Amino acid sequence: MAVGVSFLLVGCPSEHSERDAWPLARDTGVDAMVLSDVSIDVGVIDDAAEDASRLDASRASFDEVLDEIASCDAARFDAALHAVAWDRGWPLDAGAGDGRWLFATRLDEGARSVSVVGDFEGWDESRLPATRCDATRWFVVVDAADVTTATGSKYKWYVADDGSYRAPAEATQYGFDGFGRFGWVRAPLDQPHLEQFPDFRSAHLAEPRAFRAFVPTGFVAGSSGAAHARTLLLHDGQNVFHPDAFFGGWHVDDALRARGDDVIAIAVDNASDRMDAYTQVVDDIGSGTIGGRADDYLALLEDEALPFFRARYGIVARGASLMVAGSSLGGLITLVAAERDFAAMGCGAALSSTVGWGSIDPSARSHTSLVETWTGLHAPLYLDTGGGVNGSCLDADADGLEDDGDDADNYCVNQQFLGVLERAGYEPGRTLERAWEPDAPHNEAAWAGRIGEALDACAAMGWRAP
């Protein structure tokens, strides 16, 4: 499916996968992890790229892209690397009747001898040497004679200096196996795969972040099947599919594999602004006031991310077909989205949610947490926590929140929030599901253990194909 996307060309792929370190005086349950014709301005990430020529990646010929890469001008190389990543994808296929492929990458400094290797050429470490532009930039043109098959072929970069194989960070389609991350030259249709679109610069939030997708077996973008797929939208995108993420990640792809092939999962990475983006009001957790940019993040999703994914894959991704899920602060922003009727979403799953945000500051009496401000009946909700309480849930400081007892994983304040939801009209078993995993910690491994239950609960409450 052709997608009209305009690009302001920018730097090379990067991934935001580090947590910010926040000193917490107590266990607050706040973790600090960090297209029909659609015009999306990807933005300027690297000032050096501002002077790069504009390349319309959807219309540029293979040779025009190659000219930008082979110029070895840093800004032009990076701009082309980024533009292709958001359109036809890496590696770049010259198309039928030509047979050439262009591989390009950014590697860490120090490499002197690099080649591209993969199933498509028998993993021969010397057959396809790459041209070195500078300390970090490499490319190689592969002819048809060197490609036994593109579809279903894995690839990596081989660095002869130290005999290491490097995962291709630029690969649009990728996966993980027993040797770690790899790129697909072109992903097979008989198994699911991951896709990424790096360094999106939003009009609403300054920090760049990647978009990702889990594409199920047999999914064909723009097909009638795509138009009838359910969609799962996830926050903290770099933590939900990757087995090398914190605590092994969420394994959402495994949960979906076990439940059929009718769900495409889309995700937006977090960035260093995570605690601003995922919170609806300001608060202070010990390092000064922070937060309150939820409206901007939801606008990023509504105005930029969802239109891109709809255009790219031909999915509906709204109404009853859309489920939104997140954990901790990601659970909080999921609930904020539900309350604000984001994309008329069909269900929200909030795991270990920080619903007390807005009242964590012990000196504040702002009464701005969702526990105190929630009104009305909105999308069906799945809520869960691990942890538990030693003794009773208490509101010792009389701020309206039962968050002063000896509890863990936001247990008490979520119990209080359940009562708020029921008084607002939510019905347990019909529009509200609650799960508790006693003593489960506040981390990705625990959420991986419960995401399947969340998927099943939302399906039971009406998350369905359009």
Image: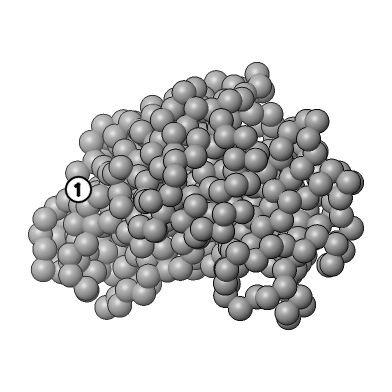
Residue shown at 80%/39% (left/top)?
A: 99
Residue 312: name its quadrant.
top right
Q: Residue at x 46, y 56 (%)?
A: 75
Quarter of the image with the C terminus is: top right
Q: Image check: 386 left or right of 225? A: left
- Residue 114, position as x, y percentages in the image: 72, 68
User: Which amino acid, by three-letter code, is at mark 1?
Assistant: Glu
**Which residue is painted at 44% across and 27% down in the image?**
38
Residue beneath disc 1 = 372
Q: Is residue 86 above or below residue 343?
A: below
Quick check: 294 left or right of 320?
left
- How many labels were placed on the picture? 1
Up/down of 85 relative to 263, above or below:
below
* Residue count near mark 1 (Cα–Cα under 10 Å), binned few <14, some 14–19, many ≥20: some
> Could one spot residue 68 in this view of the protein?
yes
User: The N terminus is located in which quarter?
Assistant: top right
Q: In x, y percent, where is residue 344? A: 38, 27
Q: Quadrant of residue 64?
A: top right
4 or 208, which is in the foreground?
4
- The image shows residue 445, relative to residue 351, as above or below, that is below
Horizontal and vertical percent position of residue 411: 38, 60
Single out the residue that lies furthest toward the top: 224
Residue 455, percent from left and from top = 56, 41
